[in-house]
Amino acid sequence: MQIEGSVVRLEDRIDNYVRETKFPRSLFVSEDGRIVGTWIMGNDYRVKSAYYGGYPAGYLRRVKALFPDKRRVLHLFSGKVELDALPGDTVDINRRLRPTFVDDAQTLEHVPLERYDLILADPPYSVEDAERYRTTMIKRNAVMRALRRAAEGTHIVWLDQVLPMYRKDAFAIEAVIGMVKSTNHRFRVVTIFRRLGRATSEVSPSKAGTRVSQRSSAPAPLS
Ligand SMILES: C[S@@+](CC[C@H](N)C(=O)[O-])C[C@H]1O[C@@H](n2cnc3c(N)ncnc32)[C@H](O)[C@@H]1O
């Protein structure tokens, strides 16, 4: 497989996932050009750090295997993310967790987003979850708005129970993967967005006359 500096096909991502994780092939490219499938996390689903809402064991290994081409990872809503499994910089609003950047994901003012080519996001899913972190519930669309500063081609791997609102001229959905942990745990969905070329309305006035790249091959929007 060609990796750095070239476009990795979705089929190549899935092949690499199967090869590296040895998990069964449960991801496919659907006729609409997206990866679809399910991850059944199996018996070893516990959170290594024991942090409330932490990624289940194996999650980061699966994501890493889908993205062998990525070099600069950012963990958003990082909590106590297991950096040994997927090294990168971290962002959390709680400074006691000692993230690389203490920042509000809804603005990300202090984060040089353009430096990263893979961003993982694991927000609180509800008001009740947010209370566990002593934070207010986030506005998902504000986070997606802040993430528009990411460079073209950056992938965002968003784990949630809700599909965040996003601009369809700024992001394309490249994968939708259902995640099943075990009995009495909530179902979740991994949505993978790709940052498209900047939309005309996002170009600063001084550059308004310049041509902006728009991928015509983006799959149709989900909604
Ligand atoms: C579901 S947990 C993430 C757990 C992480 N994936 C792990 O494996 O440990 C959500 C995290 O989001 C953080 N958080 C909540 N609101 C935030 C905000 N507005 N900006 C940045 N982080 C926030 C919380 O402090 C908490 O650590």
Image (cartoon, rainbow, N blue to C red):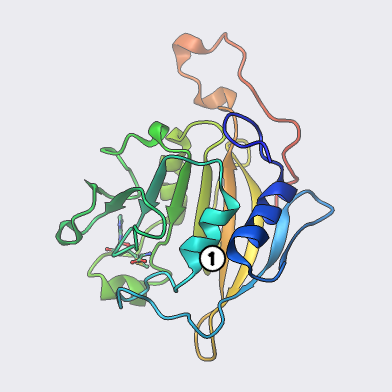
Choose top left, top right, bottom left or bottom right for residue 183: bottom right
**Residue 191, horizontal then vertical, whole percent:** 58, 57
Residue 5: x, y in percent? 58, 29
Q: How many marks?
A: 1
Is the residue 57 above or below the residue 8 in the image?
Answer: below
Question: Does residue 65 appear in this view?
Answer: yes
Q: Is residue 117 left or right of residue 53?
A: right
Of residue 156 and residue 167, the one placed in the foreground of this image is: 156
- Which residue is at 69% across, 71% downward? 24
Of residues 35 and 18, the one nearer the viewer is 18
Residue at the image point whose x is 51% and y is 91% from the top? 184
Which of 149 and 209 lies nearest the eye of the viewer? 149
Badge 1 local density, few (<14 within 10 Å), some, or many (20+)? some
Q: Quadrant of the N terminus?
A: top right
Front-lying residue, 124 or 204: 124
Q: Taking 32 as reference, is 161 left or right? A: left
Whether residue 164 is visible to the viewer of this picture, yes or no, is no
Q: Position of residue 60 (x, y in %)?
A: 47, 62
Q: Secondary structure at mark 1?
A: loop
Quadrant hosting residue 92: bottom left
- Measuring 49% from the left and 67% from the top, which residue is drawn there? 59
Q: In which quadrant will I find the C terminus?
A: bottom right
What's the residue at 52%, 38% (across, down)?
154
Q: Would you say 158 lies left or right of 32 here?
A: left
Residue at numbered disc 1: 162
| Image quarter for ligand 1 | bottom left
